Image: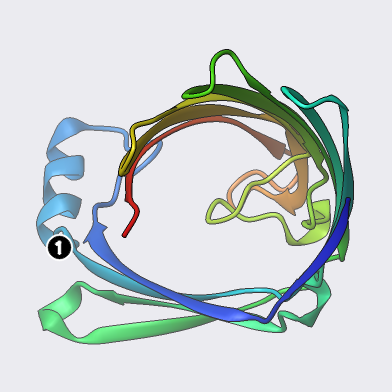
Amino acid sequence: GWGSVFRGAMELKGNGDARFKFRDVPTPALEAELNQIIPPGSSRQSFEIPRELRTGFWVAPYPELRLELDVAWQSWSSIDQTSLTTTVFANRPSTRTLQRDWNDTYNLRLGIEGNITDAFLVYGGVSYEPSPVPSKTLLPDFPRGDAMVYAVGISYDFPQVSFDLAGSLHDHDSQGTGIPEPLHPGVRGSYSAKDKVWAFSVRRRF
């Protein structure tokens, strides 16, 4: 079998708390004073998930086993800028617009799915997801390096209801930044990340 899916761009918005940690403060008394001057506040961020075109094919060596290979193109270069609003001083919001210069990416995904019994299904997969962020625009809000993603899951079907449980590990490479430290111009930083994602769902058939 073969298939192709196009998904348009989507806007993602989120709210959260903002707390500040001061570095290289010489005395605890000064740190306490700074914490009073800049207390915790709130933050609001808007972000665009770019459009995506995905295509792939699957084969079944025999009916109980299915293999699928997908390629996904994501248009990260279409994102010009994102905005971050923080509210700290006297409850006055301050918005910072971040210019982006990201690259389009091509993701490769390989999946396998098999029936242990007619009702019990096991599946897994691995994918390679290169980072859209070059070092010259790498920031703490999106410090993505190239990632390998590993996923496994199970499903069990009853006559009218199905239960699904799955988990994935996103292992991002260390990514160096071309942006120098404000107080140490000769120092460059780097970021690395590992994400674990779990999902559970119940499906009802009518």
The answer to whether 195 appears left or right of 177 in the picture is left
The answer to whether 4 appears left or right of 16 in the picture is right
The number of numbered discs placed on residues in the rendered structure image is: 1
Q: Nearer the viewer, residue 148 or 6?
A: 6
Q: Which residue shows up at 72% across the image and 48% down it?
A: 185
Say which residue label 1 marks. 37
Q: Nearer the viewer, residue 92 or 24?
A: 92
> Tag 1: Cα neighbours inside 10 Å, few (<14), some, or many (≥20)?
few
Q: Is residue 115 above or below residue 163?
A: above
**Amino acid at the residue labelled 1:** Ile
Q: Is residue 36 above or below residue 144?
A: below
Q: Is residue 70 above or below residue 113?
A: below
Q: How is the image coloured?
A: rainbow
Question: Can residue 60 be seen in the rendering of this structure?
Answer: yes
The answer to whether 56 appears left or right of 22 in the picture is right
Q: Give x and y (percent) for residue 152.
A: 58, 23
- Going by the picture, which residue comes out furthest to the top? 116
